[in-house]
Image (cartoon, grey):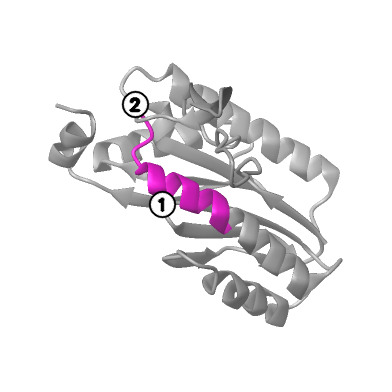
Amino acid sequence: MKIASNGLLATLALTTCLGAGLSACAPLFVGGMAVGTMVAIDRRTTGAQVEDEGIELHGASRIGDKLGDRGHVNITSFNRQVLLTGEVPTEQDKQQVEQAVSKVENVRTVINEIGVMPNSGMSQRSSDSLVTGKVKAGLVDSKDLFASAFKVVTERGTVYLLGRVTQREANRATDIARSVDDVKKVVRVLEIISEEELQKLSGG
């Protein structure tokens, strides 16, 4: 069973940048060694960022314990909200995965988008990776969005958008994702904040 976690591995000694996100990184010196850490442009608190890394790591471990070599599951956590995607053989497997992840410390909610079907092939996964890259590029190129506010996950042509954003930003990002070739559907797993909240987060 192959499990994909969208964050880089973290240790107790240091925190690394989120590989799947678009957050910028700045050096942090721990014991005289420079390591990467997520900076304030990520709209989550530092604690939430670290907890999300832990949720992905511990969740992936629990999924492996439940499924063994069966299925292909991706786990993505953003602000303690967990998105599960991928494929498993049975509905029972799907529910067991959700239950296992829901018991991980700090998990607030679980959105279970796992399909009950054969595992996707390398061709589909390559296409999904390409779509994710194009959506991220579209967010970066946009002049009216902060790309770092979003996480993008693609599974079998469905694009999932995660983040803490305003309604305006959510609508704009959805339009960008929908315009990308090979996107079948866009699912918003977003926390909507007000423009006033955004100004406070931005130090305005």
Residue 182's mark?
none
**Residue range (magenta):** 41-55
Of the pair 204 and 176, the residue shown nearer to us = 204
Residue 89's spot in the image, x, y percent? 79, 72
203 over 92 or under it: above or below? above
**Disc 2 marks which residue?**
145
Of the pair 166 and 156, the residue shown nearer to us = 166
Residue 93's spot in the image, x, y percent? 72, 77
Residue 97's spot in the image, x, y percent? 65, 72
Which residue is at 41% across, 39% downward?
174
Give the structural element (helix, strand or loop) at label 1: loop
Instruction: Look at label 1 and name its amino acid.
Output: Asn
**Disc 1 marks which residue?**
79
Left of 109 or right of it: where is 112?
A: right
By secondary structure, the bulk of the magenta-drawn segment is best described as: helix
33 over 88 or under it: above or below? above
89 over 191 or under it: above or below? below
Q: Is residue 116 visible?
A: no
Which residue of the protein is positioned furthest toward the bottom in this rendering?
Answer: 92
The answer to whether the residues at label 1 and label 2 have Cβ atoms under 8 Å apart is: no
Instruction: Look at label 2 and name its amino acid.
Output: Leu
Q: Is residue 188 visible?
A: yes
Residue 24's spot in the image, x, y percent? 47, 24
Q: CA distance from mark 1 to mark 2?
A: 19 Å
170 over 130 or under it: above or below? below
Tell me where residue 106 sits by quadrant: bottom left
Tell me where residue 170 sits by quadrant: top left
Q: Nearer the viewer, mark 1 or mark 2?
A: 1
User: Which comes sooner in the sequence, label 1 or label 2?
Assistant: 1
